[in-house]
Amino acid sequence: MLTVPTGPLVIPAAPPVTPGSFSPGSGEVFFSLVIPTYNESQNITSLVTILSQLLEGTLGDRYELIVVDDDSPDQTWAIAESLRAQYPHLRVMRRQGEKGLSTAVIRGWQVAQGEILGVIDGDLQHPPETLLQLLKAVQAGVDLAVASRHVSGGGVSTWSLTRRILSRGAQLVGLVLLPDVVSRVSDPMSGYFMVRREAIAERPLSPLGYKILIEVLGRGNIDEVAEVGYVFQERQEGESKVTWRQYLDYLHHLLRLRVALGRLGRIRRHLQFPMGRFLRFGMVGASGVFVDMGILYLLYDVFELRLTRSAIIAAEFAIINNFIWNDRWTFGDIAREQQAWRQIAKRFLKFNIVCLMGLVLKVLLLNLLFNVFGINAYLANLLAIAAVTVWNFWINLKLNWRVTQLK
Ligand code: GDD
Ligand code: MN
């Protein structure tokens, strides 16, 4: 079993020399393929069998397969380990501390011997034969070869409309937030690709969630890119690990890269801006809008209260909603340490005050933008909302859910 690398997610410029690692009979390893797995016990054997056959036919001894399993309850790691007797090119890593698809891939690449580093899903949804075309492309000299669903020969087998829209929606968001990176390939969501070691070596990587390709494109030194079409197969065995969480991680990942690659980077490093918390805070704020609207409808339309009175009560309900979510989720790690009810009540009171100040600020700002700068009222309102969200977040972070706490 391979030892899991610790420390920063950096790929060494030269293959690491580790005692006991696979030493090929003839020449050096050219290609290292990482297979990230979580509960793929029903797929791993056939995948390793097919890949070994395929790669042996083209590369002989100059390849290795690296399974990186996150301590699957179904013992994928044990099954993979047992296959090594039959497949000497296979190496297995069982991670017990860290979790997550993207970091699994990098941990695998960190121990890889090859000059070309690749990744393929462990569930047979990526057709193995495409590997040969990808290899051909990197042998011809490109820095990155991506298997794509969106070039000729590519597609998705029987995806529902919703799924297609979600996938394309995610790509669209990426194009808006990070155009230089996301627009470089037709399928930035692909988790099936190969990259030249030297293009990503010695650069600290910091991926989040599923989309490792975005990280490689964003932080690597990638000049030439090739794409090869493939049809994303339906899963036959096991199940997908995608939850709504991956969408949030993806958004967070895009913003993190945006900030790291742009001018904002300097400001952020200066302020230590906690982007993940801010995103959660923003989502909670959006949920508050629905609560506000719902209560307003109930009071004003159903119970026929006066509008001002209804609006004030509705706003307070939204504040309560937001407080609960922020206290349990956005700042949950901090709040858990301070659970006496007086401490909770104090936080709630402070939250109310900050929101009230935010409201005053919003009205002032809206007037300033509209009356003094002559900005369209709706645009002015949107800008004011954005500014007040930042205000609410920052003040609550610094004065309410304090990161520094006295024992
Ligand atoms: N080690 C590890 N840790 N592996 C993981 C984890 C994890 O936390 N989560 C998922 N995996 C493995 C799965 O076992 C599988 O081999 C692969 O990563 C992909 O996971 P799926 O859950 O099957 O993903 P998918 O099929 O919905 O998503 C795929 O969609 C893209 C196309 O839209 C991704 O795998 C992309 O690679 C792919 O291109
Ligand atoms: Mn899958």
Image: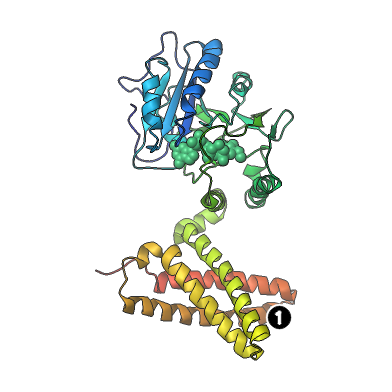
Rendered position, 271 above or below 177 = below
Colouring chosen for the image of the structure: rainbow
Q: Position of residue 349 (x, y in %)?
A: 42, 81
Let me know if residue 203 appears in the view.
Answer: no
* Front position in the image: 267 or 175: 175
Which amino acid does the dot numbered 1 rest on?
Val
Residue depicted at 60% across the width and 69% down the height: 386
* Residue at mark 1: 372
Residue at the extreme top of the image, as rendered: 26
* Front position in the image: 388 or 100: 100
Residue at the extreme left of the image, as rendered: 407
For residue 182, what is the image quadrant?
Answer: top right
- Crowdedness of circle 1 by 10 Å Cα count: few (<14), some, many (20+)? few
Q: Position of residue 6 (x, y in %)?
A: 34, 38
Q: Quadrant of the N terminus?
A: top left
Judge left or right: residue 27 versus residue 20: right
Residue depicted at 40% across the width and 73% down the height: 400
Q: Position of residue 190 (x, y in %)?
A: 60, 36
* Front position in the image: 186 or 299: 299
Q: Quadrant of the C terminus?
A: bottom left
Circle 1 SS class: helix
Rendered position, 189 above or below 153 = below
Rendered position, 332 above or below 165 = below
